[in-house]
Amino acid sequence: MARFYITTPIYYVKDAPHVGHAYTTVNADALARWHRLVGDEVLFLTGTDEHGLKVARAAEEQGLTPLEWTNGMAPRFQDAWAALDISNDDFIRTTEERHRKAVQAMLGKIHDNGFIYAAPYEGFYCVGCERYYAEDELLDGGLCPDHGKPVELMSEENYFFRLSAFQDRLIDWYEQQPEAVLPASKRNEALSFIKGGLHDISITRTSISWGIEVPWDPKHVFYVWYDALINYLTAIGYGSDDPAEQQRFADWWPAVHHLIGKEIIRFHCVWWPAMCMAAGLEPPAHIQVHGWLLLGGAKMSNSSVDRITPSDLIDEYGVDPIRYHLLRDTPLGTDGEFSAEGIVARYNSDLANNLGNLLSRVATVVGSKCDGIGPAPETTSRLAGVATEVLAEASAAWNAGQPQQALEATWRLVRETNAELETVEPWKADPGPQVDAVLGSALEVLRIVAILIVPAMPGTAREIWRRIGLEGLPEDQRLPDSARWGGYPAGRPVEKAPPLFPRRKVQA
RNA sequence: GGGGCAGUAGCUCAGUGGUCAGAGCAGGGGACUCAUAAUCCCUGGGUCGUGGGUUCGAUCCCCACCUGCCCUACCA
């Protein structure tokens, strides 16, 4: 049995959960569910990133301690993921004790290995912002871009990570593991950045206290990104004294699959592998980079256009239609458009007209021609061959981290089944073997499709499963065996019920 | 400024150094009526961003440019 450890980035609690977060998380969830379906042992991790200046300041504005603030924010993410049917096995918060221990263990190790050194950090500091700016970020005349006030040239003692020492090793790693970072376009981007020269980076702060203290010099705290990345190790037991946890770490690392957005390539594809190397660990095995959902060509975020929250969308369209749209409409890796029109178009064509309608028509004809009892599939049905091909295509796509392709392939089976019904026209024929054969085959397709859509629409999968009279749950089936043609048992009651996905009007 | 990604049919996207560049949706025509005005069949002549170059031949290789976007110390 293979292991599949998949992670999302941990989300910075400064922002409430939005559709961008949901996009990453739903994709990770679908991949996790796919791997469970094929029998892999899965560990699916998400969580929240809770340290840093912005959080501290946000808390202060509310008159709260930082921890009080984050204690209020983390559940908003947990609730959002519960509402989206996210099946994460763990939810990590960087304010947890297990994480503090892991961060101190890892960075202590890097320190021991000689890759951290103290040096003065000098930069342009804005007192109002309480942060440094790079020279080219400043407005003309050396003004803070935020306040428009003069900045000061300040200096403080900081610890630096010797990132520059890893340039050659990183390049070697990229050469030897050409599929570690995917897609290739993002890999090239990261690699060319590395080849362009790496500078050491300041990894601690004395100007703020909301962070994890540096074990060898407690008046410093770690810069939030250095703390955050380590969550991927924390969750599998790194830094624990417990032998069982240590074994768990040995079992799961480095065969991880990090799913990230393209804006954090640098942290995950440059800093993170280097940090692992510096700590004497293998770099992460897989980093899959995805693009963004765009609203009218602009990036989606909390601050701009959108007050679109995941829960708004769920209320409006339902969980599974939203999941389906997020997975089906944008290839994982490039940017895609997100729009109400897009959701509705996809909903009507794929879910209502094709899948939902297929279920409805089959249930009705089984009711009128077979007394509502599902017949056995036809062994030699043309659909059997289609199902085999579709299983192969969908499996390959899911395994390659391409939900869009997997779902596209799956829907070919749905379309072919609608076409097959048109050819045979069982509603015109008298009850008998021919009618039984085509309806049984259509039910068999619905059974297989229910299994294949578990990663995308677990609730819908269950409902189809139940309506065609099957026992158990589709997510408990195991591929590829369960998708072998002929698995639908004759003699089960098929329920005729209201449309699975009522058609929606296109909104103005 | 430096680095990078992207620009293919109305829309969302595939795709390959060489027979007519593809799919889904939308649109048009037809059939049917079991089904959610659903389904099925037929129907896609788009300078493959612009201008050069390499080549017997490029949408796919190289160069420049245009446009959009990203990174350049805390937004998936």
Image (tube, rainbow, N blue to C red):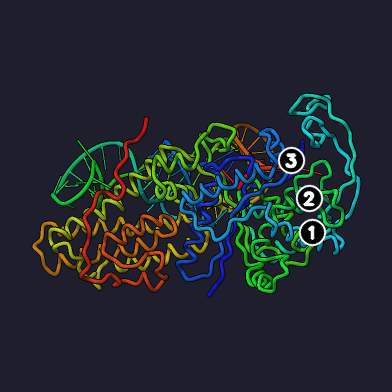
**Left or right: residue A268 compared with residue A110:** left
Same chain shared by disc 1 and disc 3: yes
Query: Three-letter amino acid code at disc 3?
Result: Leu
Secondary structure type for disc 3: helix
Asked if marks 2 and 1 touch (Cβ < 8 Å), the reply is yes
Q: Could you give the CA–CA distance between mark 2 and mark 3, rounded to whole angstroms?
A: 11 Å
Q: Quadrant for residue A388, please give it.
A: bottom left
Instruction: Name the foreground residue: A118 vs A325.
Output: A118
**Left or right: residue A101 compared with residue A92:** right
Q: Is residue A336 visible?
A: yes
Residue indicated by mark 1: A107
Q: Position of residue A375 (x, y in %)?
A: 20, 68
Dot 2: few (<14), some (14–19), or many (≥20) neighbours within 10 Å?
many
Number of marks in picture:
3
Q: Could you give the CA–CA distance between mark 1 and mark 3, rounded to whole angstroms?
A: 20 Å
Dot 1: few (<14), some (14–19), or many (≥20) neighbours within 10 Å?
many
Query: Three-letter amino acid code at disc 2?
Result: Phe
